[in-house]
Image (cartoon, helix red, strand yellow):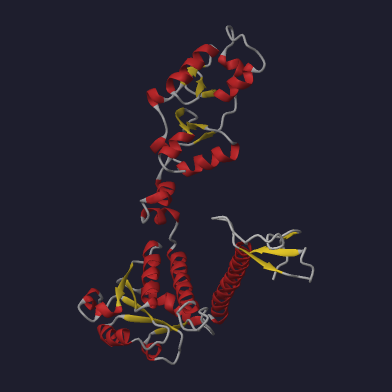
Amino acid sequence: MSTRASVLTTTARDKGQPLTRKPGAPRRVTRTLTGDTTGLDVIAADSIHQDLDADATQAAEAAALVLARRVLDIEATAISSMARRLDDSFVRALDVLLACKGRIVVSGIGKSGHIARKIASTLASTGTPAFFVHAAEASHGDLGMITGADCLIAISYSGESAELLTIVPILKRQGAKLIAITGDPQSTLAALADVHLDAHVDVEACPHNLAPTASTTAALALGDALAVAALEARGFGADDFARSHPGGTLGRRLLTHVRDIMRSGEALPTVDIEASLFTALLESSKKGMAMTAVVTAAGAVAGIFTDGDLRRLIEKRQDFADVKVADVMHRSPRSIGPDRLAAEAADLMEKHRINQLLVIDADGQLVGALHIHDLTNAKVI
C-alpha cells in the first residue's frame, strides 16, 4: 500500500474523542507503521482508488496500442507476402478484364461480399465498367443481371462458399469468364476459375485467428491492384476520372476552369495607366476585389495595385494628391490563362501568398481576375 499520506501527530483517539467524519469528507483508513501511537499514517481511500484507476487506464491504453500495432503489422505482412508471390496469373487476370466485352461483375458473401462491393466501386470509378451482385441474391433472380459477355470476379477466402458455387457453373455455361480470388489454390472455386488469384494469409489479425481481417485486407489490396493496372492499360487520366466524379470536391477541382468562376466585364476592376491613385482606389473599392488592374489603351496589362501595395505606400508617405497609379503599381503581376484549371490558380495563389490573380489570354489581353474568395465560393478550395 502506498505511504503517500499526511502524518497526524495527535489523533482524535489520543484525546479520547469519538472518531467522526464530516458529511462529504473522504473516508480515511489508518495504519500504524510503528508502535509509536503519536505517529499514524492516514491514507485517503478515495485517493488510492483514483491512483489505481489511473494506473489501470494507462495499462489498458498501452495494451490497446500494442494490439493495434500487432494488427497493422500482420496485415502489412500479409500484403507484402502476397506481393512477393504475385506471378503471371495476375497478368492473365488483367487480360481477361481488358478483353471483356460486357461488364465486370464482382460477387461474394459475408465479409468477402463487402470487399467485392468496394472492388466493384473502384473498378467503375477508374474506367472499368463494373457492378456488385450479392451471391445469395443471385440465386433468387439477380443472376439475370449477368450475361455471357460479362466477367465475374468471385471472392471467397475458403473457395467453398455455397452461394458462389451455385451460380458459377450456370454463368460458365453462358460463356462468362471467371476470376477467382481465394486463399486456397486447391479449392473448388479456384478449380472452376479461368484465372485464380491467390490471396492466402498465414494468420488473421484477430487474436483468435477467426475474424476475417488480414484475409479481407489482402483481397481488397489485390482488387485495387487489378483496378489500377487496368486504369493504366486503358490510359485512364485525370480528366476521365473527373467525368466519373462530377460531384464533390474532387470533381470540382478537376472540372472547374478559371473562366468558369473569374470576374469579367463590369465586375472586373480596371483603370487606365494614366489614372490617379485616387481613381484606382475608388475602382478597387467599388468592385470589391481589394485590387485593380492597370491597363494600357490597347488593353494590355501594365500592372496591378492591391490593398497590400496601399498599406506599404502609407508607411512611406501620406500625401497622395498628385500620385499616379503607374508610379506605385506592381509592374509584374501574377497571372493565369482562362482555360487553366481553377485548382491551378489556387496552387499559384498559395505558392506566392497572394489573394488576387489576373486572367490573361493568349494574346496578352486582360479578360478577367480571380480573388481567393471566388475559389472558396466555388468550393475549389
Vertical placement of residue 168 versus 277, above or below: below
- Give the x, y percent position of residue 360: 48, 31
- Give the x, y percent position of residue 239: 42, 53
Residue 298 visible within the image: no
Q: Residue at x 59, y 40 (%)?
A: 351
For the view shown, which residue lies furthest in the top direction? 321
For the view shown, which residue lies furthest in the front direction? 16
Vertical placement of residue 171 versus 329, above or below: below
Residue 17 visible within the image: yes
- Taking 373 as reference, is 168 left or right? left
Camera-nearest residue between 140 and 324: 140
- Taking 155 as reference, is 336 left or right? right
Q: Residue at x 42, y 43 (%)?
A: 379
- Taking 291 as reference, is 260 left or right? left
Please state, as top left, top right, bottom left or bottom right, where the N terminus lies in the image.
bottom right
Q: Answer with the quarter of the image where residue 322 lies.
A: top right
Camera-nearest residue between 118 and 153: 118
Q: Residue at x 43, y 22 (%)?
A: 287
Camera-nearest residue between 358 and 98: 358
Vertical placement of residue 119 versus 334, above or below: below
- Give the x, y percent position of residue 123: 39, 67
- Taking 217 as reference, is 138 left or right? left
Q: Answer with the quarter of the image where residue 308 lies.
A: top right
- Give the x, y percent position of residue 303: 56, 23
Camera-nearest residue between 302 and 371: 371
Total marks shown come to 0
Q: Answer with the quarter of the image where residue 127 lies.
A: bottom left
